[in-house]
Image (tube, rainbow, N blue to C red):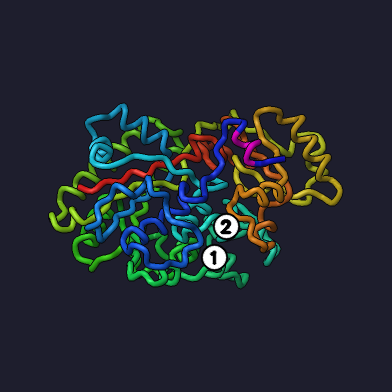
Amino acid sequence: MDVKEHIVSRGLVFPEYEGGAINSVMAGLVSLLNGHSRTLFPSKPLSERYTNWIAAEIDRVALIILDGLGYNMLREYIDDHRDTFFAEFERQGRLLPLTSVAPSTTVVAMTSIWYSAPPSIHGMAGFEIFLKEIGCTANMLRFSPVAASAPGLLESYGLKAEELVKLGGIDKLIGESDVKVFSLLNRFIVDSPLSRAIHKGIHKKIGIINMWDEFYLLGETLTKESPPFIAVAYWPALDSLAHHYGPSHEVWQDEMETISRGLEKLIKNLRDDARKRTLFVITADHGFVHSPPSNSVNIMEIKGISESLLMLPTGESRFTYLTVKNGKMEGTIEILRDALGKDFLVIPSREAFEDGLFGPPVPKATFLDRIGDIIVTPTGNKNIVWNNEENELIGRHGGLTQREMLVPFLAAVF
C-alpha cells in the first residue's frame, strides 16, 4: 500500500514536511532574520513562497500561535467579517495555508513548531501514548498515567519532561545564528512538564494572565528587547471553546472578535521603529471538525476487537493507535475495515511510518513503540471512543481532514 496515495485519494491531507508544514516555521523565521546562518534544526525552512515578499530590514518577529485556528476557519471568518483587524491583517500581508503534522493535535504539533522537527524525529506521537521505557500509557498534557487525575506524576517515576525530546534546546538548534527566542504563555502552565519539554533553551519565559496582558507584554518585548529575536505568544482559548461549543459557534466568534481587537491595539500602540521592523505572523497547531458524541464509534464494541488487542487503544479520538496480539494483525485489520467501512482509514502503523506520514522514517525504534500496530483515522466527522469516560466534546481534531490539517500562515508588516 502507498500510504500517501491512499490518504490523498480519500480527500485527506498528507503533511508537507518539506517546507510547507508547521515543522518548518521556526527554521524559516530564524533563517529570515539571519540570512544563511547555519542552524541545526532538523527541518528545512519554509518554502520561499511564504517569505520571499518580506522586506530585508525586518529584525524581529512576533509569532502568535492561536491554538485550534484552522486555515478554513480563519478564511471563513475573514470573508464574513471584512471590517475586523484580521481582514486588515490579510490586506497588509499574505494569508497562505500550511499543513499541520500527523496526528494534528496540540502536544505533537506544538513540539513540531518549537523544534522545527517532524514527529518521527522529536518523538511525540499523540495525546495519550504508550511509553515503553516506563511501561505506562501516559496523558502527555498532564504528564501522568491516563488513569491518574493529578498532573506531573511521571516525574515521580523518574521520567523527566525535559528528556522526552532529545534534540537539545532551542538555543542549540539556532546554531550559528544570534537570534533570541522568547515565550509568552499562561503563567499557570509556563513551568508545566510539557512546557519544560518543548521550551528548553529559550532565552526568556514570560507568564501572562489573560489575552490583553499577553498582547501588552508582547508589545513591551517588541519594543524593549534587543534584536534579532522571535517572540512567541501562545493563546489557547479558541481551542477550548471549539472543543466545548463546536468550531464557529457564536461564543467562538466572540473570542475571534476579542482577539482581533487585541491585535489591533497591540500593533497601533507600538512605537513606529519597532512596528516597522517587526514581522507579525499568526499560525496554529491544528484546525477542527464538528464531531459530537453522536458521531462516536466505540471500537471495543466491534465483534472480535477486544480479543485481538494487547492493550487499550491510545492516541486520539480521531487518530487512534491499536496494539494487537501476535498473529492477530491481518485479522484485526480485516475486522476493522469490514466494520468501519468508508468512514475510516485503517492503516498498518509501520507502513505509515515508513512512507513518511510522521516525517522521515529515522532508524530509531522509539517512535514505532509509541504508535502501536494499526492506525484508525476518520475520513469525515466520525470519532473513535474506547472506554466509559465522559464523552462530551463537540469539536475535535487529530485527524487528516482538510479542516483539521490546514492551518494559517498569516503574515504582515505594518
Image quarter (top left, top right, bottom left or bottom right) of the N terminus? top right
**Disc 2 target residue:** 124
- In the foreground, 397 or 95: 95
Q: Is residue 215 above or below residue 240?
A: below
Are the residues at dot 1 and dot 2 in contact (C-beta closer than 8 Å)? Answer: yes
Residue plotted at (71% across, 31% down): 340
Q: Secondary structure at mark 1?
A: loop
Residue plotted at (71% across, 28% down): 341
Q: Is residue 221 above or below residue 337?
A: below
Q: Where residue 239 sits in the image (x, y, percent)?
A: 43, 43
Mark 1 is on which residue type? Val
Q: Secondary structure at mark 2?
A: loop
Residue plotted at (52% across, 38% down): 396
Mark 2 is on which residue type? Met
Q: Is residue 63 visible?
A: yes
Prevailing secondary structure of the magenta residues? helix
The magenta stretch spans which residues?
4-8
Q: Is residue 240 visible?
A: no
Q: Is residue 303 above or below residue 187?
A: above
* Residue farthest to the right, as pictured: 327
**Disc 1 target residue:** 165
Q: Where residue 282 sits in the image (x, y, percent)?
A: 34, 47
Q: Where residue 343 sits in the image (x, y, percent)?
A: 65, 29
Examine the structure image and report whether residue 316 is included in the region drawn in magenta.
Answer: no
- In the foreground, 191 or 94: 94
Q: Which mark is residue 357?
A: none
Residue plotted at (62% across, 57% down): 138
Q: Is residue 142 above or below residue 87?
A: below
